[in-house]
Amino acid sequence: MKRVFMKKGIRFKLILSLVLMLVIPGSLIGWLTYFSSSNIFENQMEDSIDESIEIIQQTTNNTL
């Protein structure tokens, strides 16, 4: 691994380090945001289903 970096110039090393400093935190933020919004969406869907079931139960109880 050291040999690969020894042959490359300072420009390559700087670009590589900059790319890594941008990609790693960006990926982490994207991953956390995705899972956070996924959980929020799932909770909202469960709440909506519960409300729909309540409305259906009330409707059937009123008609019977």
Image (spheres, rainbow, N blue to C red):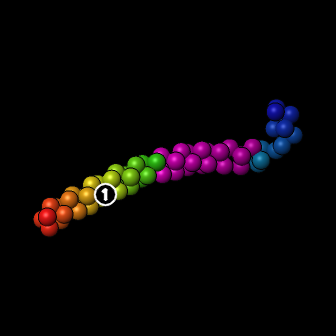
Of 25 and 11, nearer the camera is 25
Question: Which region shows up in magenta?
Answer: 13-34
Of 35 and 9, nearer the camera is 35
Residue assigned mark 1? 49
Residue 9 in the image, given as x and y percentages of width and height: 82, 44
Image check: 3 left or right of 59?
A: right
Residue occupying image coordinates x 83% and y 43%: 8
Residue occupying image coordinates x 87% and y 40%: 7
The quadrant where residue 55 appears: bottom left
* Camera sees residue 33: no
**What kind of element bears circle 1?**
helix
Is 32 magenta? The answer is yes
Residue occupying image coordinates x 42% and y 53%: 37
Image check: 21 left or right of 38?
A: right
Q: Residues within 10 Å of mark 1 (few under 14, many from 20)?
A: few
Quadrant of the image for the C terminus?
bottom left
| In the depicted structure, whether residue 7 falls above or below residue 50 | above
Is 26 magenta? The answer is yes
* Camera sees residue 30: yes
Residue 29 in the image, given as x and y percentages of width and height: 50, 48
Residue 25 in the image, given as x and y percentages of width and height: 55, 45
Residue occupying image coordinates x 46% and y 48%: 35
